[in-house]
Image (spheres, grey):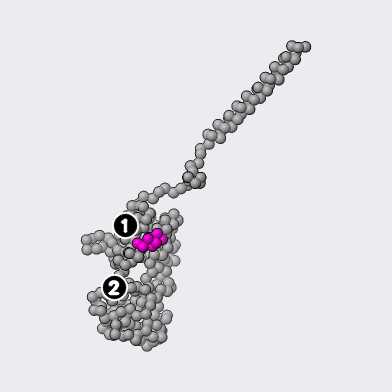
């Protein structure tokens, strides 16, 4: 009887030990399965960074060379201008190598669409047609329309009422002509083949005022060709319907990361005062 009890006790102990060994083995297998799964890379903040975009090392801009003072070749044959220097300021802010190349205007957006460049900075306006193929950053420059008159015409008021029955010169087929016909219907609108001839008409006293692009007018007024005859009259007109919604940098249609990077860089360039320095360098005369 004693032998039987001893046998049963040993059997019970063996089963218990066998169960414990099986449990340990099972836990070890589960642990091995868990630790064998690839761990997700994490940032210092604990967020997954598997899908993080690669760091950009170069930013390729395209522009033109025939739109001074925005982009042009200087006397040493170096591509320069407001757009060129702004592109470089953006690259500096993003800490990337900057490549600015020149192509004819008609080739800029097609080249961007073929991924031959990352961005186009050439004074592009945001239009419905362009938005079908490219995207744009925030606006960085606006070009207003302005009136100029002779310096001795101190009583000239550049408003629809002040210019009623007055002779206004304007270049044919331009947004400036369309603007005058819409809002200055009481004036005598005289159309010329190009802005240069319209300005000469003002200098010669053949018209009372000229209306055109503020940038072109500012350089003419302060240059030698005007012979100091004239000055701006009234304020600036910025109606988007006629003069566009401002200049912006064109980028690939789906490149949201680059848009965010350039928009942030533009804000930083403005906040640092660098943007104001570039405006003062290339547009020393009052535009607005």
The magenta segment is 267-274
Observer-nearest residue: 207 or 111?
A: 207
Predominant secondary structure, magenta span: helix
Write the residue at 23% across / 60% down: 77
Looking at the rendered image, the quarter that the C terminus falls into is bottom left
* Residue 100 circle label: 1
Write the residue at 34% across / 80% down: 233
Considering the numbered disc 1 on the image, is that residue within a helix, a strand or a loop?
A: strand
Q: Is residue 268 magenta?
A: yes
Q: Position of residue 151 (x, y in %)?
A: 29, 82
Q: Position of residue 89 (x, y in %)?
A: 34, 58
212 over 14 or under it: above or below: below
Q: Is residue 198 left or right of residue 236?
A: left
Write the residue at 30% across / 59% down: 102
Quarter holding residue 187: bottom left
Write the residue at 35% across / 52% down: 96
**Is residue 232 shown to the viewer in this render?**
yes
Observer-nearest residue: 61 or 284?
A: 284
Considering the numbered disc 2 on the image, is that residue within a helix, a strand or a loop?
A: helix
2 or 1: mark nearer the eye: 2
**Is residue 191 shown to the viewer in this render?**
no
Q: Position of residue 13 (x, y in %)?
A: 69, 20
User: How dense is the environment of label 1, judged by Cα within 10 Å: few (below 14), some, or many (20 and up)?
Assistant: many
288 over 58 or under it: above or below: below
Q: Position of residue 108 (x, y in %)?
A: 35, 60
Whether the residues at callouts 2 and 1 have beta carbons within 8 Å, the answer is no
How many dots with numbers?
2
User: How dense is the environment of label 2, judged by Cα within 10 Å: few (below 14), some, or many (20 and up)?
Assistant: some
* Residue 219 circle label: 2
Quarter holding residue 68: bottom left
Which residue sits furthest front? 272
């Amino acid at each position: 009887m004693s032998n039987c009890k001893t046998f049963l006790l040993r059997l019970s102990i063996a089963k218990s030990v066998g169960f414990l060994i099986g449990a340990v083995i099972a836990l070890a297998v589960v642990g091995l399965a868990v630790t064998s799964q690839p761990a997700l890379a994490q940032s210092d903040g604990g967020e997954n960074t598997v899908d993080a975009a690669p760091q950009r090392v170069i930013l390729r801009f395209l522009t033109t060379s025939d739109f001074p003072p925005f982009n042009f070749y200087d006397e040493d044959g170096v591509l320069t201008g407001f757009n060129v220097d702004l592109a470089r300021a953006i690259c500096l802010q993003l800490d990337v190598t900057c490549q600015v190349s020149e192509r004819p205007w008609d080739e800029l957006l097609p080249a961007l669409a073929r991924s031959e460049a990352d961005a186009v900075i050439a004074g592009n306006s945001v239009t419905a047609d362009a938005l079908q193929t490219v995207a744009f950053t925030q606006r960085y420059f606006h070009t207003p329309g302005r009136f100029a008159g002779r310096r001795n015409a101190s009583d000239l008021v550049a408003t629809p009422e002040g210019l009623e029955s007055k002779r206004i010169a304007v270049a044919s087929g331009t947004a400036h002509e369309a603007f005058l016909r819409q809002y200055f219907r009481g004036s005598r609108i005289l159309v010329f083949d190009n802005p240069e001839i319209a300005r000469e008409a003002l200098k010669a006293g053949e018209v009372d005022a000229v209306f055109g692009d503020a940038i072109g007018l500012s350089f003419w007024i302060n240059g030698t060709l005007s012979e100091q005859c004239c000055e701006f009259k009234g304020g600036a007109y910025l109606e988007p319907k006629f003069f566009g919604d401002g200049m912006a940098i064109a980028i690939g249609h789906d490149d949201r990361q680059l848009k965010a990077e350039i928009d942030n860089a533009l804000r930083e360039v403005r906040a640092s005062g660098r943007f104001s320095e570039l405006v003062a360098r290339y547009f020393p005369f009052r535009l607005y």
